[in-house]
Amino acid sequence: MENLKNLSAEKITNDLLPQKFGRRGMIWTASLIVICCIGAFAYIKQLREGLIVTNMGDYVSWGIYISNFVFFVAVSLVGSLITAIFRLSGVPWRTPLTRIAEIIAVSNITFAALIIIVDMGRPERLYFLFTHGRIQSPILWDVIVITTYFFLSLLLLYITLIPDIRMMISLKDKLGKPFSKLYHWLASFWQGTAAQEKIRDRAITILCITVIPVAFCIHTVTSWLFATTYRPGWDSSNFGAYFVSGAFLVGAGAVVVAMYVFRRVYKLENYITETHFDKMGKLTVMLALLYLYFNVNEFLVPAFKMKKEEKDYLSGLFTGDFAPMFWFAILIGMIIPILVLLFKKGRKPKPMFIVGVMVVVGAWFKRYLIVTPTLLHPFLPKYDAPARFNHYFPSWEEWAITIGSMAGVLLIITFFARVFPVISIYKTLEDKNALTKQHETTEQYESVPVS
């Protein structure tokens, strides 16, 4: 924040305004669109032919789609939580991070909802969920809490954007006219009066207070989809805390990756400083240690009891077919990040970016391991089952849809960064004014002669 004192209001505004795509931006966007189109083609094929195009079956009936769903929910969790907790606690260095976290939350929860529809096979089944849903089913709870969280996150993002959008309306000569109608539609009512500011501040506070329990509920309820199903590896009362702690970690990793990319691409070194990376590094290592604790707790208790079904499941993870992926996820997603982030040099921007990527990649494989090995080891023994039911590897259609959904998340973030500021101009100028006043007050105090 100290950097802001030496920057003029005009420079801050120019630096933080959305920028046109350059050549690299156009290539990046075109690549994401192509990947999304391949995913859409695979989904159309799945709609025409049915779920038979996937390699899911009677045992592995969820597969990579639900792994991806849990991953998206996990990443989205920390977005609104960072915004809400940082705002309510008055963390002074939060300004460059909160909007990035909000964008990540909205984009990921959008595709979490869509991937559930993909997993249903037929999209009209979503209608039956509302007409024939059973309140005692965790699936219905999950739909309700995801919908609630989506609208809360979207509202929180929009309300914090309003003053910036109004500012961009006044700067239309500098920005050009591509999005002027959108800006007018979204914020032409905003005049910045004291009454409007009061209503906006109150709305943000209410949303921040509301979104915290909803964010905890969304991943807790998602964990109940597993824990209430009688399967080895899921029959656990630890699952709620296990899921929430993992979501905190992967969400923090995603925010760190986004911080680094936006800092490099938009040259935001004056706003996203090394101090921000250092503080996020300390937060990430704490979350990694917390998640590691719940992992030890999750596997140690069934390993101690070693019931037959649990033994087959744990053997598959620790020494069997899934062992390479399991140890990769543990080392890449937790152990190595902890070792790197414990040192100050590891909390510099570039090492933090690498650690963030490791955390996110490890978290995706961890979600795959939560779903697949368990479904391959049911409590009831398999009789007269085809040989292919003993193994599962996603078909190309499943991979295309999954990777396409990830590209869709990145595409939402990319389009948002093209249309709106990724760091709040309004709040940054407020921070600068507060620093300037504080500096002037300090100088006046120091200039008073001591008698």
Image: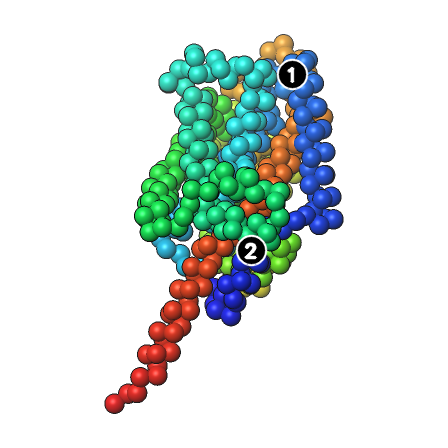
Residue 13 in view, yes or no:
yes
Where does the image place residue 16, in percent across and percent down from the top left?
56, 55
Quick one: label 1 or label 2, which is nearer the N terminus? 2
Q: Type of residue at label 2?
A: Leu
Where does the image place residue 353, in percent across and percent down from the top left?
61, 53
Q: Type of residue at label 1?
A: Leu
Dividing the picture into quadrants, the one containing residue 69 is: top right
Front residue of 368/326: it is 368
> Measuring 65% from the left and 16% from the top, which residue is drawn there?
47
Element under label 2?
Answer: helix
Disc 2 crowd rating (10 Å Cα; few below 14, some 14-19, many 20+) is some
Where does the image place residue 346, in percent across and percent down from the top left?
58, 60
- Colour convention: rainbow
Front residue of 333/156: it is 156
Q: Which residue is mark 1?
A: 47
Front residue of 73/316: it is 73
Q: Which residue is mark 2?
A: 16
Front residue of 409/53: it is 409
> Measuring 49% from the left and 44% from the top, which residue is drawn there?
102
Element under label 1?
Answer: helix
> Measuring 66% from the left and 49% from the top, which residue is drawn there?
20
